[in-house]
Image (cartoon, rainbow, N blue to C red):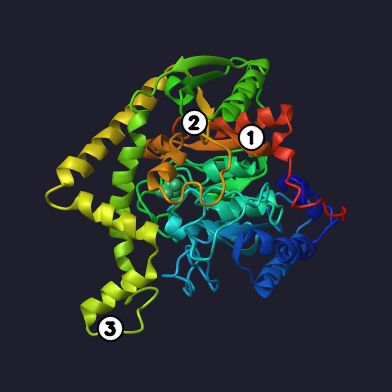
Amino acid sequence: MINSSLKQLAAALAAKKVSAVELATLFLDRIEKFNPALNAFITTDHGKTLAQARMADETLGKVGAGDAAISPLCGIPLAHKDIFCTKGWRTTCGSKMLANFVSPYDAHVVEQLASAGMVTLGKLNMDEFAMGSSNETSYFGPVKNPWDVSCVPGGSSGGSAAAIAARLTPAATGTDTGGSIRQPAALCGLTGLKPTYGAVSRYGMIAFASSLDQGGPMAKSAEDCALLLNAMAGFDPRDSTSLERPREDYSRDLAKPLAGLKIGLPKEFFGDGMDADVRTAVDAALAEYRKLGAVTVEVSLPNSGLSVPAYYVIAPAEASSNLSRFDGVRYGYRAPEYADLAEMYSRSRAQGFGAEVKRRILIGTYVLSHGYYDAYYLQAQKIRRLIAADFVAAFRQCDVIMGPTSPSVAFAFGAKSADPVQMYLADIYTISTNLAGLPGMSLPCGFGNNAMPVGLQIIGNWFGEAKMLNVAHQYQQATDWHAQMPAIAPAAPAK
Ligand code: GLN
C-alpha cells in the first residue's frame, strides 16, 4: 500500500479492498513511527484526519465503485505544506511569528483537494516563510533527508519531500517561488511540479514573493502529479492573478509516445556549475530520452546567469512588503514587554522573525528605497523581462527544455548555512523559470555521490503542463528511479 500510486490507491478504495479510514490509519501510524527521526510534520490531528476519512468512506459507499461522479482522489490521504491555510488547523509557515496561528479559512488549494475527498494527514515543516533551500531556517527545527539523515532534504518544501520519500504520505502540496518544489523533490528522489504562474490560486497561501509564488503537487510519479494538479488548478476570483482558462485534464497526454519530441538543452545549464555525479545521471537520462525517440538540440538562455541576482532583488522586495503585515497587532507573535507602540512593533518583529527572514526584509526595504529603486529594483525587473524573452526564443527551437534541477545532490547540515550566497546558488537552475512564470518539474533520474538521488528538470512552455507530464511519464514507464525508496521506511506488510 505505501508504495502504491494514487491510481492504485483509488482502485483499491473503489473495490473496497481498503477503506479511507484504514488508509489514513496506516499513514498516521507510519508518521508516529518515523516522524520523530525526520521532523517532517509540524502538526497532526488524528481526530480531524479520521473524521475526514469517515466522510470519504461515506461518499465512496453512497456512489458505486468507479462512479464517474466522484473524484479519483476521494479517500486518498495527503499532507499540506504549512504555508497553506487550513481551517481549524495550525498554520505556522515554519515561523515563530505564526507558531500559534489557527486559520479561520481554507486556502483555495486545500478547499479543492478536500472537496475532491482527499484526507489531510497533517501540516508539513518548511523553511521559515519559505525562505531557504535546506529547511534549516524552520523555527520548528530542520527536516532530515530520509535517504541520509545527516543531509538536508532541500527547501523550502523539505517537509513535503521528506514525508513522501519516507512514505509517511502518498502525496503532498508544496510551493515554489524560486525552486522550492523542484529542488527538494530532486534531493529526496521525488516528482514535483511547479505550474505556470496563475494556474493554481494563491488564495490562502501565505505570501512570500507574490509575483513568483506558485503552489503545486509533489508525489512519487508524474502520473500522480497530474491527478493532483487536476484538482488543484483552476480559476479562483479571490486571487487577482489567477488565470481564467478552461479546466484541463492534465493526464490527457500521459500515454503519448515521444517520437520526434525536441528537447532543448541550454548550454548555460551544462557548464561548470554542475557536479560530475549529477552530470552523469542527467546525461544518462538524456540518452534514455533519445532511445524513446526524442532528439536533443542545443539552445541558449544567455541571461540565465543573471537569474539569481535578479531574484534576490525582486523576491526580497516583495517579501519586505508582504511581511509588513506581521506587526504584532493583526497577526502573530507580540513581544511580551514594550514601552510604547513603536517599541511593540520593533520588538515583536525582532523577536518573531528569524535571521534569514530579517536579512530578506532588510535587502527588500533597501532595494525599494527612494535612492536605490532605479539602481536595483528597476534593473532587476528589466533582467526579468530579458530572461522571459530568452525562453520565448528557446521554445521556438524545442518542445521542452531539460537540465539538472540542482547542481549537487543533498548536502550535509551546516554545509551552506553560514554562507547565504552559497545557499542561494542551490537554485541556480530553477529560479529563471519562476522569473519567467513558466512551468517546471523535477523527476528522479538516478543516484549520485553517497547514493543520494539526482533530479532531472523539465521546463515547459507556458501552459505546457500536460506536455511536461507526458514527457516525464514516458520516462517513468521506461525506468524505475521514481519507484526507489530509502531504507528508513521499510516496506510494511501488504494489507
Ligand atoms: N531557495 C529560494 C529562496 O530561498 C527559493 C525558495 C522558494 O521557492 N520558496 O528564496
Amino acid beneath label 2: Gly
Nearer-N-terminus badge (1/2):
1
Looking at the image, the residue that sits furthest to the left is 371
Up-down: is 165 above or below 391? below
x and y, in percent, of residue 376 in the image: 21, 42
| Residue nearest the observer in this picture, 172 or 408 | 408
Residue holding disc 3? 338
Q: Nearer the viewer, residue 178 or 408?
A: 408
| Quarter of the rendering containing residue 311 | top left
Count all numbered tags in the image, as a single digit: 3
Q: Does the numbered disc 2 mark a residue whose Cβ is under 8 Å from ligand 1?
A: no
Say which of 160 and 281 sits in front: 281
Q: Residue at x 66, y 38 (%)?
A: 450
Depicted 84 relative to depicted 459: above or below: below
Q: Are marks 3 and 1 in contact (CB under 8 Å)?
A: no
Disc 3 from disc 1: Cα separation: 51 Å
Q: Is residue 235 visible?
A: no
Alpha carbon separation for disc pair 1 and 2? 28 Å
Question: Measured from the top left, where is residue 462 in percent x and y?
Answer: 44, 33
> Closer to the observer: label 1 or label 2?
1
Mark 3 belongs to which amino acid? Tyr
Image point 67% across, 18% down: which residue? Answer: 292
Q: Secondary structure at mark 3?
A: loop
Circle 2 is placed at which residue position? 460
